[in-house]
């Protein structure tokens, strides 16, 4: 692991050469259903765990919910027109399970599917490649009531739902992501409980993680059967995990957190096994009674691509007797069995989420996936930053967000130069939206959303990104 070198300060854009990306590089932007659609009770949609969670007092900042969100469900045409203005080559969106299969079982809801059919048709009409994510955290509530992801049956339900979506959209959608960030679903949803469904039990988090991956494997098989030409992948959120010092104890803390954050998913998905050290670490949490013969073969079903979401780095230190774990942006209870590891802040620039800005970490992450795990094409399926935005004279000049994108695109290019088969990049996010437990208080969009009027204002970063897409790269500075 490299040392946690201080990343260059953002905002200081010194002389930098122009950079050109490989021909056909897929420039995109991403969103997720619950974060933008609204229309929570329309068109036959039933509640998901995020509806229940956001309507539970105290769970989401200021009691915000996704009931209306960006009202994208009713503003599809205008939003796609904005995407076309930006020149997006691809748009990554997610399908709301409870919109297309209300309650999470039974037949498809034609009205729900119709929304996604219109979305896909209109994207294609504008020459924008649809990139469909099947699961971005919004489990239908009845499936949670029946046990949620800690219950094995949920994996099979996910495969059934996948079949419905593949039958309806598989003729027009080429790129498919099964799960978005299973770490968050498992460890924030069932470990720390800061995400829906808000349960807090380490063993359940570990079971959830396994069943999410099992659901992924079954969904891959369902997609292959329904649409042999589909390009199928999964999106994982990865972090370089760096020890705070050279001490063996800090190195061990980094090994443990790397196991839970990264290898818990990468190893089963891409190698068909759990790392032995991770199993040993987790033996105090669970007896792994949920693992069945054959699961890992399903989980490691061959893929066509891997999606990487990258936001920041973890710097960690060993527990110190009598010293409380340092306060950081993750609750200790999302690290089952390693709750005592300290997450260290380095004092480098942070975003409005308090996430440290670390573009070199993107190079490290992409190289690791390629060099240690797979030759498959890689895509950055999310990368971006929240900053406080101000509308001045009808404009939003988001220089910090722009600098964040610039630094990370330079990092992406560096990874390509180092031999990583990186084929595309999706900015998070197309527009400001419901940022989960933070509600509407954190803005990640390239397009500003005025939640009172639902007006959209492309920020400076959006105009800049349009130019990046047009040039297929970055201008000299
Ligand atoms: C990722 C999520 C995405 C958004 C960004 C900021 O973890 O996939 O929905 O919340 O973080």
Image (tube, grey):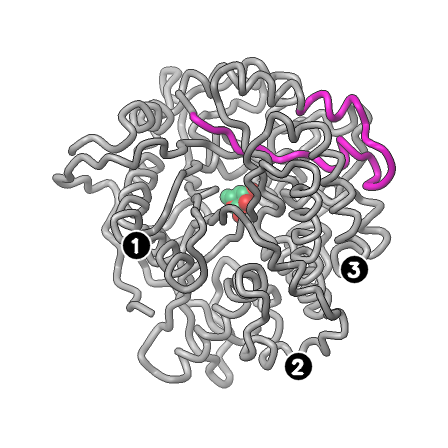
Q: Residues within 10 Å of mark 3 (few under 14, many from 20)?
A: some
The magenta stretch spans residue 96: yes
User: Is residue 434 among the parts visible in the rendering?
Assistant: no
Q: Residues within 10 Å of mark 1 (few under 14, many from 20)?
A: many
The dot on residue 475 is: none
Residue where numbered disc 1 is placed: 360
Residue 469 image position (x, y, % from top left):
33, 27
Residue 233 image position (x, y, % from top left):
55, 46
Relative placement, left or right, of 24 versus 337 is left
Which badge, 2 or 1, is on the more N-terminal residue? 2
Residue at coordinates 48% horizontally, 65% vertically from top-left? 327
Which badge, 2 or 3, is on the more N-terminal residue? 3
**Of 248 and 17, the residue lying toward us:** 17
Mark 2 or 3, closer to the camera: 3
Residue 200 image position (x, y, % from top left):
71, 63
Residue where numbered disc 2 is placed: 284
Relative placement, left or right, of 245 versus 325 is left
In the figure, 319 relative to 57: above or below? below
- SS category of the residue bearing label 2: helix
**Of 459 and 93, the residue lying toward us:** 93
Give the position of the N terminus as an image quadrant. bottom left
3D distance between C-alphas at marks 2 and 1: 35 Å
Q: Are marks 3 and 1 in contact (CB under 8 Å)?
A: no
Instruction: Give the magenta part as a residue range.
Output: 89-116
Residue where numbered disc 3 is placed: 152
**Of 291 and 358, the residue lying toward us:** 291
User: Is residue 167 among the parts visible in the rendering?
Assistant: yes
Residue at coordinates 48% horizontally, 22% vertically from top-left? 128
3D distance between C-alphas at marks 3 and 1: 38 Å
- SS category of the residue bearing label 1: helix
């Amino acid at each position: 692991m490299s040392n946690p070198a201080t990343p260059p300060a953002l905002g200081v854009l010194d002389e930098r050469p122009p950079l050109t990306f490989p021909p056909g590089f897929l420039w995109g932007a991403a969103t997720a259903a619950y974060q933008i659609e609204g229309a929570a009770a329309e068109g036959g949609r039933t509640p998901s765990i995020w509806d229940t969670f956001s309507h539970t007092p105290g769970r989401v900042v200021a009691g915000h919910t996704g009931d209306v969100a960006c009202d994208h469900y009713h503003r599809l045409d205008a939003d796609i027109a904005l995407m076309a203005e930006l020149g997006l080559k691809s748009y990554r969106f997610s399908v709301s399970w409870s919109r297309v299969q209300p309650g999470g079982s039974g037949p498809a809801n034609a009205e729900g599917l119709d929304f996604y059919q219109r979305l896909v048709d209109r994207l294609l009409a504008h020459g924008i490649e649809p990139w469909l994510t099947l699961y971005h955290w919004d489990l239908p509530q009845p499936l949670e009531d029946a046990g949620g992801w800690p219950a094995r049956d949920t994996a099979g339900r996910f495969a059934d739902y996948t079949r419905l979506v593949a039958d309806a959209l598989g003729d027009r959608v080429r790129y498919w992501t099964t799960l978005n960030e299973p770490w968050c679903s498992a460890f924030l949803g069932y470990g720390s409980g800061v995400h829906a469904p808000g349960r807090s039990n380490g063993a359940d988090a570990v079971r959830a993680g396994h069943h999410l991956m099992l659901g992924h494997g079954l969904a891959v098989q369902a997609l292959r059967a329904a649409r042999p030409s589909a390009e199928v992948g999964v999106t994982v959120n990865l972090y370089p995990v760096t020890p705070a010092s050279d001490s063996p104890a800090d190195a061990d803390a980094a090994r443990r957190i790397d196991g839970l954050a990264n290898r818990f998913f990468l190893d089963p998905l891409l190698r068909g096994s759990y790392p032995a050290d991770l199993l040993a670490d987790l033996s105090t949490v669970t007896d792994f009674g949920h693992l069945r013969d054959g699961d890992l073969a399903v989980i490691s079903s061959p893929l066509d691509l891997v999606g990487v979401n990258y936001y920041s780095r973890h710097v960690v230190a060993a527990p110190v007797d009598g010293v409380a774990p340092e306060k950081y942006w993750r609750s200790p209870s999302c690290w089952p069995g390693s709750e005592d590891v300290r997450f260290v802040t380095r004092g480098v620039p942070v975003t409005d989420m308090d996430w440290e800005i670390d573009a070199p970490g993107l190079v490290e992450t992409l190289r690791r996936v390629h060099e240690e795990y797979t030759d498959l094409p890689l895509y950055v399926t999310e990368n971006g930053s929240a900053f406080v935005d101000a509308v001045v004279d009808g404009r939003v000049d988001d220089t910090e967000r722009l600098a964040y994108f610039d630094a990370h695109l330079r990092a992406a290019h560096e990874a390509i130069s180092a031999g990583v088969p990186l084929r595309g990049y999706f900015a998070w996010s197309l527009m400001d939206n419901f940022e989960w437990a933070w509600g509407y208080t954190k803005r990640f969009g390239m397009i500003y959303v005025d939640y009172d009027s639902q007006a959209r204002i492309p920020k400076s970063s959006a105009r800049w990104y349009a130019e990046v897409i047009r040039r297929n790269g970055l201008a000299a500075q």
